[in-house]
Amino acid sequence: MTKVHSQPIVRCAIYTRKSTNKRLDHDINSLVTQREVSSAYIKSQSFKGWVELPSIYDDGGHSGSGLDRPALKQLMQDIEAGDIDVVVVYKIDRLTRSLADFVRLVEIFDQRNIALVSISQAFDTSDSMGRMILNVLLTFSQFERELIADRVRDSIQTRKRHGKIHGGMPPFGYVSKSGRLCIDAHEEKIVQFIYDEFLRTRRYTTVMNAVRDAGFRSSIKAIKSGKSRGGRLMSPGTVYGILKNPIYIGEIKGKNGNYAGEHQPIVSRSVWEQAQAISAERKKKSPGNKGTEHLLAGLLWDDLGRHMLLDLNWHRGKTYSAYASSNTMWSQRVFRRAYRANAEQLDRTVIASFSDLISDRRVVRKALKKLGVFGDELESLASAGTGASIKIGAMSAHELRELLKAVFYRIEVGPNSLTLEVRPLEVRRFLEWQGGSTFRGRPADWPCSDARYEHEIAVRTITEERWPSLHINPCNAPLRESRDEKLINLVKGARKAQKLVDQHRELSVDDLAVLHGCRPTHFARLIRLNYLAPDIVTSILDGSQPKELTSDELLKSNVPTDWAVQRRLFGFAEPTREPDSRNLFGRGMWPAKQ
């Protein structure tokens, strides 16, 4: 009897891409053509067991110069999940036009035994000849892309040398008529007002306040879709740009200097030169934030979603640095104050927290499981955490900055917590890193895996401007009849127990319990009550605690160190804060420190 061997199934995924959105709404477009040709090729290889997967990986309107594309990300996720055996493309430049990106993708394909097939170029990466042809084709694709970019840059510079604006919406103060810039009479007065105020006050913040008080708004201009944009209150960035843009003296800023423009100036050259002299003087007084040793710039957000920027102040020759929330429009409308954190202290806290995270075997295992690492490899990497933590302690500021930029996706700062969002992909690389050179991330690999791991630490690193860190309200009213003497005695007993610990450090818990006149377990629970939030303690003392909170419940509970968690656990409301309606446009609201 002849044995029949069944052909193994080879799962094939088709990837298509189109650089522009043109004709994507048509029934027949480039993506459809690429898919039909690729599908026909897969059917022709059915004798090899090739089967087309139903999943669609189409990237319409995405350039091939990078890897940040939604369909490509989904493709890489499915490859990591083990759902794909062959990736089929119409042409190799549909996958990527960058040689560096292609090398990264091929490395990932090789690790997972994925074959890459190009239909029109008739090769695949399963043999050495296909690899050679692929590298040659990609080199020419990248060369073509760079030539196009050079031609575009040369065209822009040529137009600027002839005094013309190249594309985009006209700047504030001008409108476009027949391809030329013409002065808008209403906006011309606003520009002149801004320059006059700056020359008079010599301060950006004062100018911004004057603009807001006058109610000046940005230009309302039409875009290609026919819709209009603008008309909002002018932002600090708009005002700052007006004071720095040479367009207002009839010049156009170019790569190697300014060129005389065809348009009419709005301010005189003498006014412009005075404004630039004031700006240069302010920069000279403040060295700016370049060259600082602070590590977290670009990584920080607050828990309301506002980016936190480095803010430097100088007083009597000394620099004071802080991270401050950006003044977004929505936070201005609802009068939410900026979070501020001492930069040096926050840097140290993040470094210490990451060092603790990387040395904690349980945390490292959870993070790496997000990446799909299991078994012996997981245990081997988790064991390397202690050594990696030691390496962190020996790093210089420059090396730490590179490490944090690679490992952290973002860091969120809240009133009572710090959340570290790490990239397990880079955590794995760092655990495998042998040292010898600066550890740097691989941004080209990041789109291949969107795995994230959040690690929250209960720590207070910020205080909202002018709000105290402790929320204790004085009780001027008579003491309530609802005061629970048992609860009050517990608080007093906790303080007495702590005093015994402070005075008798040579004694054990058993001996201290004897001095206090209780059992060791009761003594340990009393000590734990010293970690209660101050506002909870004051509520107990004046009798305003929730009725459900009893001495028995408080004594037997596990008192968390996080005050916000304590309030929720014991039924207390979070401290209320009245909105501040005063002017919020203070220091630190400009796009860069001046």
Image (cartoon, rainbow, N blue to C red):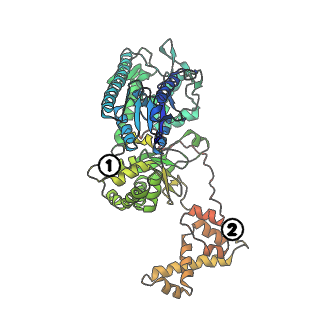
Q: Name the spot of residue 94 as percent of width and height, x first.
A: 43, 28
Q: Nearer the viewer, mark 2 or mark 1?
A: 1
Looking at the rendered structure, the kind of residue marked 1 is: Phe
Sequence-wise first label, 2 or 1: 1
Q: Is residue 20 left or right of residue 101?
A: right
Q: Is residue 461 above or below residue 194?
A: below
Residue under the point 62% across and 54% down: 577
Q: Name the spot of residue 69 as percent of width and height, x first.
A: 47, 34
Q: Name the spot of residue 349 as percent of width and height, x first.
A: 42, 58
Residue receiving disc 1: 439
Looking at the picture, tell me which residue is in the foreground, 437 or 450: 450
Question: The residue tagged with tag 2: helix, strand or loop?
Answer: loop
Looking at the picture, tell me which residue is in the foreground, 68 or 245: 68
Q: Is residue 449 visible?
A: yes
Looking at the picture, tell me which residue is in the foreground, 83 or 1: 1
Residue under the point 42% across and 42% down: 446
Question: The residue tagged with tag 1: helix, strand or loop?
Answer: loop
Question: Residue 544: which numbered mark, if any?
Answer: 2
Looking at the picture, tell me which residue is in the foreground, 118 or 325: 118
Residue at far front of view: 1
Q: Name the spot of residue 242 as percent of width and height, x first.
A: 46, 28
